[in-house]
Amino acid sequence: LVAEIEKKITEAFDVFDRESNKTVDVRFVNRFTKILQNLNRDKQLSKLISALQEEPGGFVHLEKFLPVMKKVLLDRRFRPIREDVILHAFQALDENKCGYITKEDLVKHLTEE
Amino acid sequence: AGTSSAGSATQQLGSVLSPAFKAAVLIQQWYRRHVARLEMRRRCTWRIFQSIEYACEQDQIQLHNFFSYLMDQFTPRSSKERDFISRMFISGESYKEAELEKYCDYESIEVPDSYTGPHLSFPLLPDHATALLEAFQQKQQLHARYVLNLLHETRKHLKQLPNISHVSTCYSEEVTVCGDLHGQLDDLFLIFYKNGLPSPSKSYVFNGDFVDRGKQSLEILVILFTFLLIYPKEVHLNRGNHEDHMVNLRYGFTKEVMQKYKVHGKKILKMFQNVFCWLPLATLIDQKVLIIHGGISDTTDLDMLEKIQRDKFVSVLRLKKRKESSRKPEIQAINGERESGTDAAGNEAALRLSLQPQSAQAPSTANRLEFSRWLRQTVQEQIDTCRRLVDISESEPEELTYSSMVSLKDVNEPCWTRQEEWKQILDVLWSDPMPQEGCRENKVRGGGCYFGPDVTEKFLEKHRLQFLIRSHECKQEGYEFCHNRKVLTIFSASNYYEIGSNRGAYVKLGPDLIPHFVQYQANKTAHMLTMTQRQGFPVALISRVEESAFRALREKLFAHTSALISAFKAYDADNTGRITLSNWATAVESVLRLGLPWRMLRPQLVRSTEDGMLEYKSWLDDLAMEQRSQEHIQSSLLEVIYRNRSNLETIFRIIDRDHSGLISFEEFQQTWKLFSSHMNIELTDDGINDLVRSIDFNKDGNIDFNEFLEAFRLIKLPV
């Protein structure tokens, strides 16, 4: 199972590896790890992810990427958000029950203390 | 900026924060994942298209290797067979000037009064160009007489041009450079609409690959040539690897011309052949920016490039041979029998050097060995003659004919210079940049090199250039920099793989030589759907492009059914009929060799699994069901046809010398037999007969191969 996960991670990594040299631009790593960082409670994992983002030269090597992602996947922390949960979230913000929320609403809620 | 810190704040102040806030964060996270997933899908789709495209190009090279193999191994059993083979090599013949004028004469062609299209007279004027643009927008067709006339004039003009065009930004303020158009007329219209028509104050460079794949290659060429003649100082054309009749046979230009000009198509094609070879090879802006279609190699030399007689290279695709290190001609001759296709791939067949030609007198047939040896020689000579015709355009017969790709050690081949020249052109038209340093053979495309940033650096320094502009590769955004911004790829055919797959772009350079890009996408529907520029396509569009990519992929899988079964069986020692999904991925890659992320693609390709195991036989059967538009044809035969469709088409077109779309039944049979030997498959005469009869393509003993090929197009899987 571990080997399979490793292969999966490597495959995904290769898709973004534009130069075929086992590195990806750190910006891509940022995009994906932001999601992870928001959800994790594991300090150690948190540190690893930050380390990934601060790679000098702006590239992340597969060697560093693989163990972090392996742990993430094996720990099964990041299941997809269930549809009913998301629906509930939208409804919570839709005070007037009109069936939609505006961008401004969302921004307001995200930036208010 | 506030959001990520707010994110971690969630953990600490969980209970204190309002539900509204938590809800907002959740939505944000969900959305980010969604976007990331879309991005992943988009990239995978791109990979699929690209790897299939390049595999197809590689196929073509293998086809040429097959022809070489043919020449080496095949002993024709009759003069008919011999004619058949030699015809394959005469397709590239070139004419001397006078012959060309006579054969492709246009003056005798009358333009009927009923013709409502545009009329051209020479010398051309801007009004003619406008008339043509309008006419093509209304889907009219230019009369064959004018096409031929235009081509003659274009050829006359191009002949005067040097191999490397020089452009200066001090005359016209800006130069606009466009990349591959590939017959997509809508893109050309879009460029003219956004950027303006060529004029004394508006210079253009078109960097090759005007034809093939798209359906309006002819119109594009007519328009470009017209502008070329009206504004010779402002319009510059570079040759691309598709400006080559051998490539056109495969990728659609030949077919397009024949369909549009049923009577004069052949003449028109012949003229195009002789115009393409006169297209300049490169353009230089202000002596600082070099524009070539493909790229460079570590041996590219501008001085040599300038001096080559470029018209000698009507087709850059040559029949390649590998020289065998040890000579064993005696054994082959004595063997007498026809060599069986044991070198299965055929591609690796080493050249059996022919014996010194002996007297032309045929020995008595009583001595079978002698006879067969004589036969081989005669065939060899015949083939040599054909080769000579293929290679030479207007030069003396003494000049050497055939250049070998590899061995330069062979002093018997006095074509050293010819070989070098050929390589210069091949590299410039077919090479691709790579991120790694160095320079190596471009095995994926089968021609040119992969060149690294060090090669670029050295080249730029040597010729005191600032950067290179090239095309040849499709790019998502229509353009892309690499090699530290020293190499710019510009690609002007939008929606190249599929509607929504990519943008097209053109680049403008002023005297400061700083590139300014303009991107576009030619399809209205696609444009409306592509809302968020930065993040790529919304789901609906991605799904559509994806669907197309997966369809192509499923076809590929089907085409390799036999090989896949063998590969799967290797992982299924106990013969359970099932393998793990992990092994599935490994096996598939080992057969298809497309370098795709199979584990990511699996959900789209494999519908049902049990405990993480796949029943591979039924999976393959399902694939076959999708493809089987012809139910009564045996599955393995179908597989062969699918796998070799492009090759088959190419061969058919070569055989079909009058470009009628029909070949005789006998020729059809011959083609299949040749394939059998190449592919190592059993295909009896009866099998072939059944095939033809069942599909009923017979037209008085001739086979319409366009119909034949159409019948094996994919049918859409019913939802």
Image (tube, coloured by chain):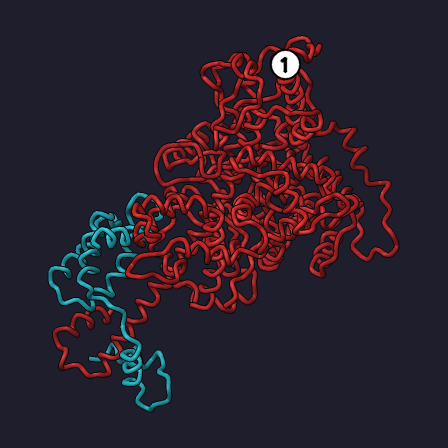
Chain colours: A cyan, B red
Depicted B57 relative to depicted B128: above or below = above
Q: Pointer 1 indicates a residue of which chain?
A: B
Percent x, y of residue B175: 55, 47
Percent x, y of residue B89: 65, 29
Residue that mark 1 sits on: B368
Give the class, few, some or many, for how many residues have Cα within 10 Å of label 1's Cα (few <14, many ≥20): some
- Give the side of residue B691 with respect to residue A54, left or right: right
Percent x, y of residue B313: 61, 29
At 37% from the left and 84% from the top, the residue drawn is: A100
Closest to the observer, B654 or B495: B654
At 17% from the left and 81% from the top, the residue drawn is: B17
Quarter in which the N terminus of chain B is drawn: bottom left
Q: Amino acid at mark 1?
A: Arg
Residue B517 visible, this angle = no
At 48% from the left and 44% from the top, the residue drawn is: B54
At 17% from the left and 66% from the top, the residue drawn is: A40
Depicted B426 relative to depicted B210: above or below = above
Closest to the observer, A37 or B483: A37
Q: Quadrant of residue B593?
A: top left
Residue B346 visible, this angle = yes
Closest to the observer, B664 or B523: B664
